[in-house]
Amino acid sequence: MAIKLTKKQLAVLNFLQDFTEENGYSPSYREIMSGLGLSSVSAVAEHIDNLVSKGVLKKVPGAARSLEVLDYKHEETVDLFKARMVGCTEEEKKVLEKAAEILELNLE
């Protein structure tokens, strides 16, 4: 099951990733608002809260610039791959390993 993000949520997530890579720290809510042309800081806060609840973003309450984009590949997917690999043929195992590599899943 993939996580569904709205276009705005995806834009916020991408902005966070790019800003953090360029600056070494996460942006403030005002920088996100300005960078994405959003109407208010509360709009940014709502998007951030929704991304946190979906498990793709982490923040430390009360700490400034503490936003961290998480890898949003579900652990359940890795568990399913591992379970399917138990007792499968060598050919099936190679196919599953290749699929996991394409999906950038760590099966170890």
Image: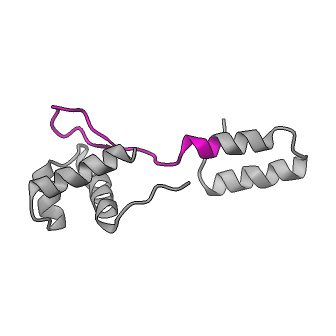
Judged by its main secondary structure, the magenta piece is loop
Residue 61 painted magenta: yes
Q: How is the image coloured?
A: one colour
Residue 26 painted magenta: no
Please identify the quadrant where the N terminus is shown. bottom right
**Image x and y of residue 6, in percent:** 35, 64
**Image x and y of residue 78, in percent:** 63, 43
Can residue 20 be seen in this snapshot? Answer: no
| Residue 1 vs residue 12, the one in the foreground | 1
Q: Left or right: where does residue 75 sit relative to residue 12?
A: right
**Image x and y of residue 20, in percent:** 27, 49
Total numbered labels: 0
**Image x and y of residue 91, in percent:** 88, 52
| Residue 50 vs residue 10, the one in the foreground | 50
Q: Left or right: where does residue 97 sit relative to residue 37?
A: right
Can residue 107 be seen in this snapshot? Answer: yes
Q: Which residue corresponds to the image point at 79% horizontal and 55% vertical from the top-left?
A: 95
Asked if 35 appears above or below 1 in the picture, the reply is: below
Asked if 51 appears above or below 11 in the picture, the reply is: above
Q: Which residues are magenta?
A: 57-78
Q: Which residue corresponds to the image point at 25% horizontal and 44% vertical from the top-left?
A: 24
Please identify the quadrant where the C terminus is shown. top right
Q: Which residue corresponds to the image point at 24% horizontal and 33% vertical from the top-left?
A: 60
Q: Which residue corresponds to the image point at 39% horizontal and 60% vertical from the top-left?
A: 5
Tell me the quarter of the picture where residue 63 sits: top left
Tell me the quarter of the picture where residue 79 sits: top right
| Residue 65 vs residue 61, the one in the foreground | 61
Asked if 88 appears above or below 42 in the picture, the reply is: above
